[in-house]
Image (spheres, rainbow, N blue to C red):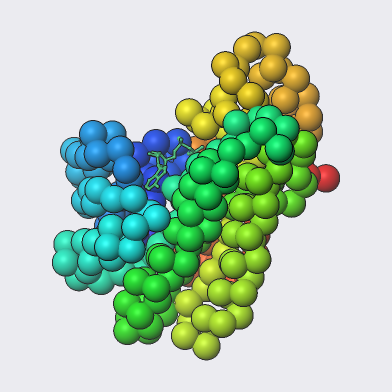
Amino acid sequence: MKLQGKNAVITGGASGFGEGIARRFAAEGAGVVISDLNGDAGAAVAASINDDGGRARFAHGDVTISADVKHMIDTAVSAFGGLDIVVNNAGMPQRNQPMIDVDEETYDRMFDVNCKSVYLSALHAVPVLRERGGGVIINTASTAALRPRPGLTWYNASKGAVVVMTKSMAVELAPDDIRVNALCPVAGDTPMLGAFLGGEVTNEMYAKFVETVPLGRLSTPRDIANVAAFLASDEAAFLTGVCIEIDGGRCI
Ligand SMILES: NC(=O)c1ccc[n+]([C@@H]2O[C@H](COP(=O)([O-])OP(=O)(O)OC[C@H]3O[C@@H](n4cnc5c(N)ncnc54)[C@H](O)[C@@H]3O)[C@@H](O)[C@H]2O)c1
């Protein structure tokens, strides 16, 4: 098992990619703290992992609130005795629409959820990882950061910031043996997909998007979790500052 003896915090772990990552990390032997705004769904994922013989806790919280972020880090330390891996996965989409139709409140909230969350997580997690002698931070960016498409301008920009944060954190934290890498998924069939495609997902819209992916399908939580488990493991010991496209060739 790749992550035996490690402990992880996964934000947005109640749904989609975050749930997939939490389940995979637990199956690889990690203790996992699932953090999410959605209390019922987050607690259900943690309970289901525990029922399957894994080690999971739920920490309710909003990644834009410093005290909530501290709570999720503290939960890992109190429940499992330490922290090794933080996955900053919680995110907020922009509904596909012209850039000047996005209101200021949505813009601010999106940058808080997608970017400020990485900052707050660093404030609370880095001292704990330093004390541990090292660790791994994984940020969920997007292909939107690498190949921005129209209609998602501010979302694209927020994920672009996540890519730069990842690289900058990687060089600054390398002396502490803290590796920082990013996941760049192409669209995945999660509750977020409708926003990216501009509303309800019709079969026609779905098929049109799939046509743009050389491997002929959207990403799945399993695809994302496979890469996250590798990056979190010692197999990726010499990787830091990389932003991996998990996109079936879409960015080519
Ligand atoms: N689905 C896609 O097409 C896609 C593609 C590329 C990148 N991403 C990114 O992947 C990540 C996960 O997205 P997903 O598709 O699994 O979405 P999802 O909607 O299935 O899950 C997102 C989770 O984050 C939680 N969340 C949202 N705001 C939060 C906050 N402020 N504090 C705590 N939790 C919060 C939600 O409650 C939800 O459980 C996001 O960062 C997203 O931007 C998604």
Residue 123: name its quadrant: bottom left
Name which residue lies at 52% across and 88% down.
175
**Residue 42 image point, x, y percent:** 28, 40
Name which residue lies at 23% across and 34% down.
40
Foreground residue, 154 or 124?
154
Foreground residue, 74 or 64?
64
Give the total of numbered labels. 0
Instruction: Specify the quadrant that holds the N terminus.
Output: bottom left
Name which residue lies at 77% across and 46% down.
147
**Residue 61 image point, x, y percent:** 29, 50
Residue 80: name its quadrant: bottom left
Q: Is residue 121 visible?
A: yes
Give above or below for 173 relative to 71. Answer: below
On screen, residue 40 versus residue 107, left or right, reads left
**Residue 69 image point, x, y percent:** 32, 61
Instruction: Specify the quadrant that holds the C terminus.
Output: top right
